[in-house]
């Protein structure tokens, strides 16, 4: 059995939740999202993040706007939509239930 594979699957499962949580606080462009994830020890590369952001946008959980950058090309800033906030609330409830269940079983 490969623990690294299981760990990677666990991280992928919560990545969407973490991204939505980051964007709940304020809008951000992808590099900022990656930096926030890295600071929490969730290492994500652009090749993983961009398709996920597109999928969340297509599900109408995220919206974006373009802003000119003083140091390069325009930046795409993502923000949570009202649907995204509702979905995040549901994920928060599920996360709390899972946390309790896992703590109960692993103590």
Image (tube, helix red, strand yellow):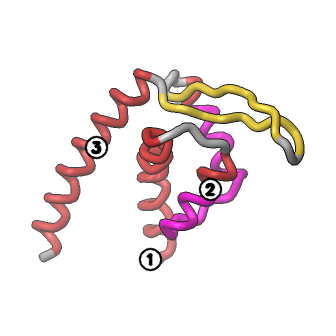
**Residue under circle 2?**
34
Magenta: main secondary structure: helix
First reached walking from the N terminus: tag 2 or tag 1: 1
Q: Nearer the viewer, residue 81 or 42?
A: 81
What's the residue at 52%, 64% (across, down)?
A: 42
Q: Nearer the viewer, residue 70 or 36?
A: 70
Picture coordinates of residue 15, whole percent (x, y): 48, 52
Q: Specify the segment rendered in magenta.
A: 34-55
Report if residue 72 lies within the magenta region. Answer: no
**Residue under circle 3?**
92
Indicate the secondary structure of the residue bearing disc 1. Answer: helix
Picture coordinates of residue 81, whole percent (x, y): 47, 24
Q: Is residue 22 above or below residue 87?
A: below
Q: Nearer the viewer, residue 34 or 15?
A: 34
Q: Is residue 38 above or below residue 52?
A: below
Indicate the secondary structure of the residue bearing disc 3. Answer: helix
* Circle 2 residues within 10 Å: few <14, some 14–19, many ≥20: some
What's the residue at 44%, 68% (across, down)?
A: 6
Would you say 64 lies left or right of 40 here? right
Q: CA distance from mark 1 to mark 3?
A: 26 Å
First reached walking from the N terminus: tag 2 or tag 3: 2
Indicate the secondary structure of the residue bearing disc 2. Answer: helix
Furthest-right residue in this view: 72
Q: Quadrant of residue 66?
A: top right
Q: Quadrant of residue 86?
A: top left
* Circle 1 residues within 10 Å: few <14, some 14–19, many ≥20: few
Q: CA distance from mark 2 to mark 1?
A: 24 Å
**Residue under circle 1?**
3
Picture coordinates of residue 99, whole percent (x, y): 21, 58
First reached walking from the N terminus: tag 1 or tag 3: 1
Quadrant of the frame with the C terminus: bottom left
């Amino acid at each position: 059995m490969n623990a690294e594979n299981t760990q990677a699957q666990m991280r992928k499962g919560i990545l969407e939740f973490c991204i939505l949580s980051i964007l709940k606080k304020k809008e951000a462009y992808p590099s900022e999202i990656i930096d926030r994830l890295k600071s929490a020890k969730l290492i994500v590369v652009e090749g993983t993040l961009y398709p996920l952001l597109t999928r969340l946008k297509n599900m109408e959980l995220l919206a974006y706007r373009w802003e000119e950058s003083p140091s390069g090309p325009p930046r795409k800033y993502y923000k949570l939509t009202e649907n995204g906030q509702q979905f995040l609330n549901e994920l928060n409830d599920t996360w709390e239930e899972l946390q309790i269940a896992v703590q109960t079983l692993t103590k």
